[in-house]
Amino acid sequence: MLAEDPRNDRNKMSTAYLQCIETSCQRRYPLDSASHRCTACGDLLDVKYDFALAEPGALRTTWQQRKTSGTAQDQSGVWRFREMLPFVPHGKSVVTLSEGRTPLLDVPQAGEWAGGVRVAIKHQGNNPTGSFKDLGMTACITQAALVGSRVTACASTGNTSASMAAYAVRAGMKAVVFVPQGKISAAKLAQALEFGAVVVEIGDNFDQAFHLLRELPPELGLYLVNSLNPFRLEGQKTIVLEILEQREWKVPDYIVVPGGNLGNVSAIGKGLAELQHAGLIEKLPRLVVVQADGANPFYQMLASGAAQIRPVAEPHTEATAIRIGDPVNWKKALRALNLTEGLCESVSDAQIFEAKAALAHDGVGCEPASAATLAGIRKLTRAGKIERGADVVAVLTGHQLKDPESGLRRRSEADLSRQRLQVEADPKKLRAAMENILQLSVS
Ligand code: F0G
């Protein structure tokens, strides 16, 4: 089901094209180019626009006014900002599930725990399929429809597959997802199956599955929606617009994201650059990307001063969403950190689960990968790289219910004996158990 572009809503069209990110190449391609890489030098591509934007005040007012509109496009936290991603020709439909519109919430206890910083979380778990991937998927599947694709495909640690399956079925396309065998959470697998995707369980990790998918011949006609596809990043960059709007356009000191394939940090960096160029913001926040110790090739590259990424052959972390050893977007991520004087940190699984527990004190749940943000903030604050009192937005990328097994596994025996009681169905025993609990909780 596709949402019609309302007739009276004249998008100021601009010229849009693809362009190689390599500064010595910068070759341009049309938007419907079959390859997601530069065919001349093999590097990544950006979607670029010759923007003809209205002045900042007028744009902000338009975006604000659309909040009260009932059209499907305006109900989307991505397409409400369509002037910033004007690749959909006027009159064409978008594939939307009303993504975005997620809360920005302060978490004072977590901020204290992280070293006395002011932390607000942007919770992307509140998206239709429970992760930030939906922002990218509405853009990417819209483009897939524009070029007439029938079958979409991705490799995934779980969230991309759930999201792609939902948007593809809505657009009437087939979905084939490649996931590492036995290495994604049951909840994410169940989502992709429920939306009718074919799930190919292959290889031991994301990198292997992704490699095998990309080796398939183009004749199969699979439309790849991994974040190598630059249209994904167009949708994902709109998170900065929502964050800034929710903050009445006050730029935070830091925006922190977990890093796997490094698409999200790249998208946010691109969004910030474009907002600055359009005069919507005057300064930039520093971008911070946090990886898990067992899957941290980007961190290692920056820490060692190497010029190239060296893939981690056997990535490991309980935060399965970011268990990636060979991130495809590292050059774009580097560009984003260079632009914003950004930082990269690496945290252990133990630190990730401590951070997840700290967020729970503010009534906020998330999947493990998302909690890497708070763990990273704490580590950087302790090292004096983030200053006390700093104004920080942490992007929580996925919903708490995406991975309940790991949370249960990680609860200590002491916590479980205090919190999880099995009581015989007998009023006296129940009363004794209750008295015991109440005594414990007042002492
Ligand atoms: N957080 C969550 C919950 C994720 O699912 C992912 C990536 C990331 C963070 C990292 O984002 O790759 O843009 O750096 N998940 C992908 C997937 C790889 O297949 O669902 P990134």
Image (cartoon, grey):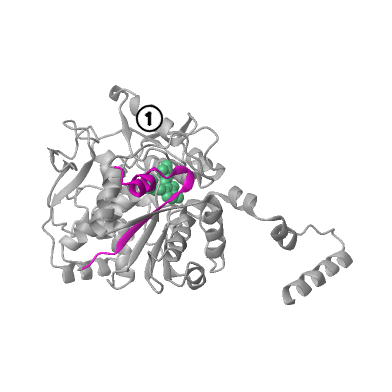
Look at the image and say whether residue 365 sits in the magenta stretch: no
Residue furthest to the front in view is 304
Q: Position of residue 17 (x, y in %)?
A: 15, 43
- Look at the image and tell me in which quarter the C terminus lies: bottom right
Task: Residue at 31%, 22% (x, y): give it.
Answer: 217
Q: Position of residue 212 (x, y in %)?
A: 39, 27
Is 180 positioned to the left or the right of 101 in the image? Answer: right
Q: Is residue 1 visible?
A: no
Foreground residue, 212 or 109? 109
Label 1 is placed on what type of residue?
His
Residue neighbourhood size for the residue with mark 1, other residues' Cα within 10 Å, grouped as few (<14), some (14–19), many (≥20): few
Q: Position of residue 425 (x, y in %)?
A: 84, 59
Above-or-below relation of 362 to 188: below
Foreground residue, 115 or 133? 115
Foreground residue, 87 or 388? 388
What is the span of residues highlighted in magenta in the rendered image?
283-306
| Quarter of the image where one finds residue 310 | top left
**Residue holding disc 1:** 211
Foreground residue, 410 or 193? 410
Task: Residue at 56%, 68% (x, y): give it.
Answer: 361
Q: Position of residue 367 (x, y in %)?
A: 51, 53
| Quarter of the image where one finds residue 298 | top left
